[in-house]
Image: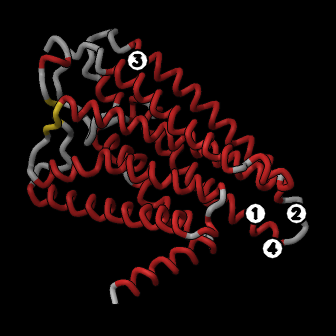
Amino acid sequence: MANGSSFNEFLLLAFADTRELQLLHYVLFLGIYLAALLGNGLIITAVACDHHLHTPMYFFLLNLSLLDLGSISTTVPKSMANSLWDTRAISYSGCAAQVFFFFFLCSAEYSLLTVMAYDRFVAICRPLHYGTIMDSRACVKMAAAAWGTGFLNALLHTANTFSIPLCQGNVVEQFFCEIPQILKLSCSDAYLREAGLLVVSLSLGFGCFIFIVVSYVQIFTVVLRIPSEQGQHKAFSMCLPHLAVVSLFISTGMFSYLKPPSISSPALDLVVTVLYSVVPPAVNPLIYSMRNKELKEALRILVQWVQCQHQ
């Protein structure tokens, strides 16, 4: 095949060959997807409706839930539909859309997690200036910058990836279209331009990672100096959920993209990709609500209100 325009669809990796296992994959993904929809939907509704949660931390959490909903909706429904209808096909435009939206939402989420680390740093290390530094206008600008960075990054990478001639067929060795798998189909040396862009993006990502690490080193230095145990507990309760989400997001993503080729296999690639693309959006709401009394109380009130409406 001379280039990407000479075919109109890609073939995605199937989770299983037998009909029973295909249906099992459909049911498992449906359960995870519904859990992500419910958890993130409840957080979005609770933060939007409860004026006690109209603070920078919860504003950024609402944005995080929106990004999580978007990223899991980009990949999982198509994979479920393919298993249900016993097909592997995705249209050329559908594949390009998956690449764009997944890269956009993941890039924006990583930028937002960096902004959230800064928010925690200011709240704990500069508490007297928190209201001035993190006012509503600054928070909106930071969130917009995170979304905008992700959008431009995705636009650049998607346009570049799909302008590369594809000579290695149209079989994508993953359950959704992602850039590294598309590059495997490219003609020899044609992928170097996109590989260079990925290196630039990884370098920027590493810069964000260093910023998050430095922020938390300073945060924990300040927290450990707090004389009261109750004060330390409150500070840790503010930071640990974000730190857990960051660790899950970065560790699974880095392992997926940076693991050595010697241990790479279709089965391992599939498992690792599920871990970084499907699991975080489903478990992030649980991580954030477990140790957060304000959020749990808002969710309890919301659930009670919904129950009253149905009685």
**Badge 2 vs badge 4, beta-carbon distance below 8 Å:** no
Where, by quadrant of the figure, is residue 61 drawn? bottom right
- Please name the amino acid that badge 2 sits on: Ile
**Is the residue marked by circle 1 packed among few (<14), some (14-19), or many (20+) residues within 10 Å?**
many
Q: Is residue 115 above or below residue 92?
A: below
**Badge 2 vs badge 1, beta-carbon distance below 8 Å:** yes
Task: Mark 2 or mark 1: name the one nearer the start of the chain.
Answer: 2
Question: Between marks 3 and 2, how big is the CA–CA gap?
Answer: 48 Å
- Please name the amino acid that badge 3 sits on: Glu
- Please name the amino acid that badge 1 sits on: Ala
Q: Position of residue 47 (x, y in %)?
A: 54, 64
**Quadrant the C terminus occupies:** bottom left
Q: Which residue is mark 2?
A: 226
Which element is circle 3 on? helix
Residue 32 falls left or right of residue 211: left
Q: Which residue is mark 3?
A: 194
Q: Which residue is mark 4?
A: 230
Query: Which residue is located at x 20 percent, y 53 percent?
Result: 80
**Badge 1 vs badge 4, beta-carbon distance below 8 Å:** no
Q: Position of residue 93 (x, y in %)?
A: 21, 30
Residue 306 falls left or right of residue 142: left
Q: Residue 235 shows which numbered tag?
A: 1
Is 109 in front, or is 16? 109
